[in-house]
Image (tube, rainbow, N blue to C red):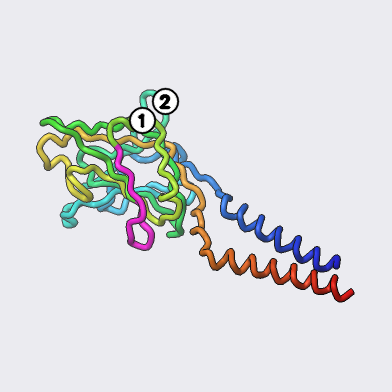
Amino acid sequence: MPKIKNTMLAMSALLVVFHLGQAHADTVIMDFDTPLMPAAVFGGFGGIHIEDGFETTSIAFNDLANPTSHIHGALNLGTGSRVSQLEADAGGAIFRATSGDNFAFTSWDMPTLDTAVTTGGVSNLHVVGFDDGAQVAETILTSAAAGTTVSFGAAFGNVDLVEYWFELPGRGEDPAAGVGLLNLLAEVDNVTFNDAIPAVPEPETYAMLLVGLGLVSFAANRRRTHH
């Protein structure tokens, strides 16, 4: 009987550890200060800013022969810390793990988000998560996000690439080439990454665990009846 009890306890412990494993996450924060992000990162020329196993660079314009898309490392006058600026003449930017592994894209601080089109109307900032080339998540930010911490939610919990860009004009397009789009500006800071959240187990997984527990219980009852 003690062996049966120990087996049941071991299987229960396995379930607990399994769920704790689901919740475990190592946090990395890209603050652009350590090391300092340079004044310009040119995606078309291979410029990449790396911190603690994560990297950011820009999305080249569709005219790959003359790539000019870029993001800037700039000083936040309010806090004195470095921020990443996606300016009006950038076609977008990305975040990814240097290892290529999946990760959870958790949040970022957004000191500035200027979306006003000078000729009238507004733009939006698209933040899109991908896994193996397939889009799995999207958040659309308006000027209301300025001065806030943006949380990206469970949909960004298991991605291998995050892109962000202004719409209008669109991914890889030059806002400076569009009338009234010159003033678009997105500043991000303290970009937070966590371990990828494993996919929710299939019902069959739980069924197998329950069957295992049932067999152990059946064996315990049979042994007790035999004695």
Residue 79 image label: 2
Q: Are marks 2 and 1 in contact (CB under 8 Å)?
A: yes
Where residue 146 sits, quadrant-wise, is: top left
Q: Is residue 54 in view?
A: no
Hey, what amino acid is under mark 1?
Pro
Question: Which residue type carries mark 2?
Answer: Thr
Q: Residue furthest top?
A: 78
As displayed, is residue 29 above or below residue 212?
above
Residue farthest right in this picture: 227
Taking depth in this image into account, of 181 and 213 the one nearest to the observer is 213
Q: Which is nearer the eye, 9 or 136?
A: 9
Q: Nearer the viewer, residue 165 or 17?
A: 17
Q: Is residue 227 visible?
A: yes
Q: Earlier in the sequence, mark 2 or mark 1?
A: 2
Q: Is residue 133 magenta?
A: yes
Name the outermost residue toward the bottom: 226
Q: Tell me how far mark 2 sits from mark 1, CA to CA.
A: 10 Å
Mark 2 vs mark 1, foreground winner is 1
User: Residue 204 at what x, y percent from top left?
Assistant: 54, 68
Measured as percent of width and height from the top left, residue 196 is found at: 49, 54
Please tell me whether mark 1 sits on a helix, a strand or a loop: strand
Segment tinted magenta in the rendering: 129-141
Question: Which residue appears at 36% of the width and 30% of the height?
Answer: 111
Residue at 71% across / 71% down in the picture?
215
What residue is shown at x 58% (from left), y 64% (from top)?
206
